[in-house]
Amino acid sequence: QQPVQSPQAVILREGEDAVINCSSSKALYSVHWYRQKHGEAPVFLMILLKGGEQKGHEKISASFNEKKQQSSLYLTASQLSYSGTYFCGTKNNDMRFGAGTRLTVKP
Amino acid sequence: DAGVIQSPRHEVTEMGQEVTLRCKPISGHNSLFWYRQTMMRGLELLIYFNNNVPIDDSGMPEDRFSAKMPNASFSTLKIQPSEPRDSAVYFCASCTGVSGANVLTFGAGSRLTVL
């Protein structure tokens, strides 16, 4: 069963912040975040393995609440290069992705 | 490493024709995944292999789709006969194992158009 992402789309101005949420009806053992630019393949951003763990990558960070079976991706002071579609994935042998959140950053 | 290699990158074919998509995973990766991406359905998992053995093919849409992994360095996804609704981007991805900690690396994808 695939995770559920929200929102479906976000439009930001450069420098603004955004949060993308991911939830699952099944127990989460790990959450993976990927970004896909238009016409390209998804690229790995970060992985969260423990409940409550937060990871960071430049100005992109994520949290993982194992109890609530939720993860959130935080993009702060967004840059034009952040534009793309963000997917969360849950891996339990297989890897299933959410429907994606299309993020557009405008100048 | 050259990454996950897929071919062809683009395929245009007519309804009813057979289509074969190919994937070479990263050397040392023993899990391989096939995904289909469309606007309507997002990234759908079609099938995945571990150590060349198909583990879950429940995502394969119908009997027209089949996948094989004859050895650790090669996999194929075949559609016979193809239909216009099969038009999509097909991605292959590989990782080092089935653990939740293993990260997928995607190939560049094969864009299929069935007329």
Image (cartoon, coloured by chain):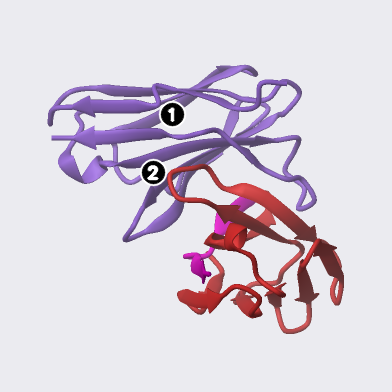
Chain colours: A red, B purple
- Indicate the chain on which mark 1 is placed: B
Between residue B81 and residue B87, name the one nearer to us. Answer: B87
Does residue B80 show up?
no
Between residue A75 and residue B17, name the one nearer to us. Answer: A75
Q: Are marks 2 and 1 on the same chain?
A: yes
User: How far apart are labels 2 and 1 at the CA level?
Assistant: 9 Å
Label 1 secondary element: strand
Q: Which mark is residue A3?
A: none
Q: Amino acid at mark 1?
A: Ala
Label 2 secondary element: loop
Q: Which mark is residue B60?
A: 2
Which residue sits at x=39%, y=43%? B60
Q: Main secondary structure of the magenta part?
A: strand
Q: Which callout, 2 or 1, points at the residue further toward the start of the chain?
A: 2
Which residue sits at x=47%, y=65%? A99
Which residue sits at x=68%, y=27%? B51
Residue A11, image x, y percentages: 48, 76
Q: Amino acid at mark 2?
A: Met
Q: Is residue A96 magenta?
A: yes
Residue A83, image x, y percentages: 54, 61
Q: Which mark is residue B67?
A: 1
Would residue B8 appear left or right of A34 to someone viewing this image? left
Q: Which residues are magenta?
A: A94-107
State yes or no: discs 2 and 1 in contact (Cβ < 8 Å): yes
| Mark 1 burial class by Cα count in 10 Å: few <14, some 14-19, many 20+ | many
Q: Residue furthest bottom?
A: A68
